[in-house]
Image (cartoon, rainbow, N blue to C red):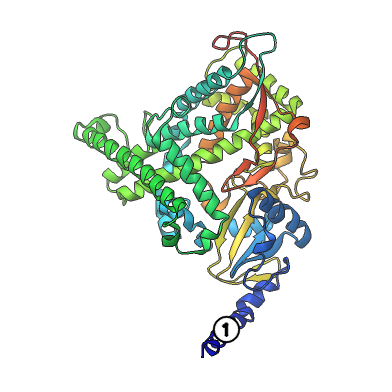
Amino acid sequence: MFWAIICLVAAVILFFFLKWEYSTYVKTINLIPGPPKVPVMGNALLIPRNPYGSLQILQEKWPKMYGRIYRVWVGFQAFVDISSPPLMEEIMSSQKFLNKGEVYNPLLPWLGEGLLTAQEKNWRKRRRLLTPAFHFQILDNFFDTFNKNADILCQQLYRHLPEKSEMNEREIEVFPFLKRCTLDVICEAAMGIQVNAQLEDSEYLNAVQKFSLILFENFFSIWRLVPEWIFFLTPKGKEYKKNLKIIHDFTSKVITDRKMEIDEEFETKKIEKEKESQFESKKRRAFLDLMLIAAKEGADLTDTDIRNEVDTFMFEGHDTTASAAVWFLYCMGTHPEHQERVREELTDVFGDSNRACTLEDTTKLKYLECCIKESLRLYPSVPNIKRYISEDITLNGYTVPAGATISMHIYSLHRNGEVFPDPLVFKPERFEIEQIAGRHPFAFVPFSAGPRNCIGQRFALFEEKVIMSTLLRRFRFTYDTAKHGPAKPSADLVLKPHHGMPMILTPLVNDFFGSK
C-alpha cells in the first residue's frame, strides 16, 4: 500500500511536470536561444552563487555565446536577458511594462511600495508627486551638504596617512570611507538629520549595513525558495527582523518629530510668510519635509507611504553613489594620464583654492563629467534591472510570452563592442558631444531610461562631481595592479569591488587644511 501511494504521487508529479514542460508558454520561451537546461532546476546549477562569478556568466559569457537576447530558466521561472540598445529601448520606453515583478519582493519588507518597488498605479501617482523635489533649483540647495561631507571625507582619509614626511603616502581601503560619506549626504538630504556616519558609530547605521548584507546574501541563497516564516525561525531570520525594526523605528521617529515641527510652522504661518509651496522652497528642505508639506496640503500620503519613500531614498542614494565613486577612483588610479588631465581642469576652475564647489563650477567640469560617465559605462552602479511582462511581446523576432521576466543587462550593454569600439578600454572622449551625437540613446543607461528612470540621477551626478573634484584637488590616487591584479566587479544589488578597493593616496597639499 505504501509503495502504491508513493508511485501514485510520483505519477501525479510527473504528469503535472510534463504538462508544464510541454505547455505553450515553456515551448515559446525555449525557442529563444539559451544554455541547455535540466528538469526542475533549469539553468540554476550553471550560475555561480558568488556575485562575481554570476556577473561573468550572465553578462559576459552567455551574451557572447547566445547573442544579445537569450533565455535563462531558474527553476520554473523564465528570464529573457537582453543587452542591445534597440531591445532596451523597446522595454524601457514602453508604458506597458512598468512593473518590476516578484523578483523585487525581498525588498518589500524594507522599502514597501516606494518608487523603486511600487506597482504601476502607485508608482505613477508617487512619481508625479515627487518629481518637482528634484528640480534643478532645489538641488542647488544641497551643494553645502555635498561640500561639507566631501571635506570631512578628505580629513578622514588624511588622518589615516602616516605623519608628514617627504613621502607620506599610504595604501588605504577607500570603499568604506566613500560609503560612510554618501550615507551622511543622503541622511541629511532625505531626512534632514545629521547622523555623522563618518565620525561616529550609531545603532541605525549598523542596522542598515547588517540588514543590507543579509538581504544581499538571501538573493543568492536557498532561502528565496522557502516560505518567509521558516527563514524567520533561523538565527539569520531573527537578525533580519531585529535590524529591520531598528531601521523602521528610527525612520518613523524622525518622521514623527519632523511632522510636529511642520505642524508648528503651519500654525505660525511661517510657510505662508516665506511664500513656499510644497516643492518650491527658497531654503533647503529635506525630501522628507517636502513630502510632509505635500501631505499637509492634501496629497494622498500616509506616514507609511512617506517612510517607504524615505527608506527608498536611503537605499538608492547611499550604495549606488558609493559604488559609482569607488569605480571612478579605480579608473583614475589605473589611468594616471586621465587623472592629471582632470586635475588640470580643476586647476583651471578653482586655481590653488580649496573653496567649495558650486553648481556653476560643475557646469565647467566637462572632462571630469566625461570621466565619470566613462567609469559608469564600464562599471554601472546597477548592473541589471528587471521588468515583468504582462502581455506577449515580440523582441528581435522572438515571442516573449506574458508571465516571463525581462532582465536588462546594463553591464553587458555598456560593454557591447558594436556600440563602443574597444569596449574594455577607458576612453572618456566617448562622452564628448561630437561622439554622443550619433550614438543610440539607449546605448548608455546607467540610471535606466524611459518613464521609470532614476528620479535622483541629477542629484547623484552633482554629488559625485562635488566629492570627486574635492578629492582630486587634495590627493593623487594610484591603484597597484601588479600587487592586487585588476579589480573584480561583483554584482550584488549594486556593482561593488569583489575584494575591496585598496588605493595609494598621495596628498597634494603641504598644509592639508590650508592651500596648496
Amino acid on which disc 1 is placed: Ala
- The outermost residue toward the right is 422
Q: Residues within 10 Å of mark 1 (few under 14, many from 20)?
A: few
Q: Please count the marks in the image.
A: 1
Quarter of the image for residue 386 reads: bottom right
Name the quadrant containing residue 348: top right
Where 473 falls versus 133 (above or below)? above
Q: Quadrant of residue 250?
A: top left
Residue 114: tell me if it is visible: no
The residue lying at 44 percent from left, 46 percent from top is: 312
The residue at 55%/27% (across/down) is: 466
Which quarter of the rendered picture does the C terminus lie within?
top right
Q: Which residue is mark 1?
A: 10
Q: Is residue 174 visible?
A: yes
Residue 177 horizontal/vertical position (percent):
55, 29
Q: For this view, does 507 lie left or right of residue 213?
A: right
Relative vertical location of residue 317 with respect to residue 70 in this rendering, above or below: above
Foreground residue among 403 and 253:
253
Q: Where is residue 143 drawn, in percent x and y?
A: 48, 27
